[in-house]
Image (tube, grey):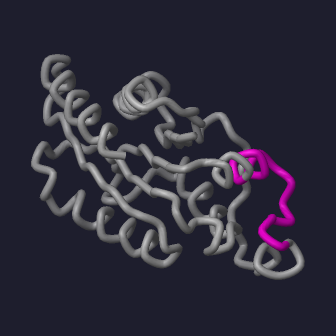
């Protein structure tokens, strides 16, 4: 099973459409971060101690963690806001810390990020690509990254973006 966590606060925009293309291509379940009530990680360590992989906070993250535990591939889809992932998805990523490293072994972690730059080697992607790689290395997950952009608000340009997303999804 694939879990696709979509981080856009704006319904129906590029990141949502990218998540839908991934689901259409390889299947899975889309979780929209904007629809969840997730508290911030407070770094209390409960999940690594008494909680044995679960957080003391009782919110929508319990369900997300359960789905991630069952997933073969976790795909983070987010627009880039000011060289960062959105504030909508960041608490979810932080709270995934509750999973023990051994629970990640054998899983794939993929990031598909969209920005305004069409060159996937641009700095806006490089910063987040490297950050995701460090996370994947830490949890010993296989890592994949795609940075895509549509410099202008053209539907034709975005359809080419979706072709890149489809091709990338097939590699997962």
State the image quarter where residue 24 is shown. top left
Front residue of this view, candidates 46 and 101: 101
Q: Residue at x 49, y 74 (%)?
A: 140
- Position in image of residue 55 (x %, y %): 80, 65
Position of 15 relative to 112 (above/below):
above
Magenta segment main secondary structure: loop
Which quarter of the rendering shows the N terminus?
top right
Judged left or right of residue 146, residue 75 is right
Looking at the image, which residue sits at the far top? 155
Query: In the image, is residue 60 part of the stretch drawn in magenta?
Result: yes
Q: Residue at x 60, y 48 (%)?
A: 71
Q: Residue at x 37, y 62 (%)?
A: 143
Judged left or right of residue 138, residue 131 is left
Position of 14 relative to 159 (above/below):
below
State the image quarter where residue 16 is shown. top left
Judged left or right of residue 86, residue 154 is left
- Position in image of residue 29 (x %, y %): 58, 33
Q: Residue at x 54, y 33 (%)?
A: 28
- Position in image of residue 136 (x %, y %): 44, 69
- Position in image of residue 111 (x %, y %): 38, 52
Query: In the image, is residue 7 part of the stretch drawn in magenta?
Result: no
Position of 4 relative to 49 (above/below):
above
Read off the magenta span: 52-65
């Amino acid at each position: 099973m694939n879990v696709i966590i979509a981080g856009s606060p704006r319904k129906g925009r590029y990141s949502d459409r990218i998540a839908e293309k991934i689901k259409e291509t390889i299947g899975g379940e889309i979780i929209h971060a904007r629809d969840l009530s997730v508290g911030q990680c407070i770094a209390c360590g409960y999940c690594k101690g008494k909680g044995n992989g679960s957080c003391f906070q009782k919110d929508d993250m319990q369900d997300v963690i359960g789905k991630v535990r069952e997933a073969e591939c976790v795909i983070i889809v987010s627009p880039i806001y000011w060289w960062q992932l959105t504030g909508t998805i960041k608490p979810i990523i932080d709270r995934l810390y509750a999973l023990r490293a051994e629970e990640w072994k054998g899983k794939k972690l993929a990031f598909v990020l969209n920005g305004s730059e069409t060159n996937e080697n641009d700095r806006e992607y490089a910063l987040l690509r490297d950050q995701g790689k460090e996370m994947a290395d830490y949890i010993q997950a296989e890592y994949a990254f795609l940075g895509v952009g549509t410099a202008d608000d053209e539907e034709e340009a975005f359809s080419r973006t979706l072709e890149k997303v489809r091709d990338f999804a097939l590699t997962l």
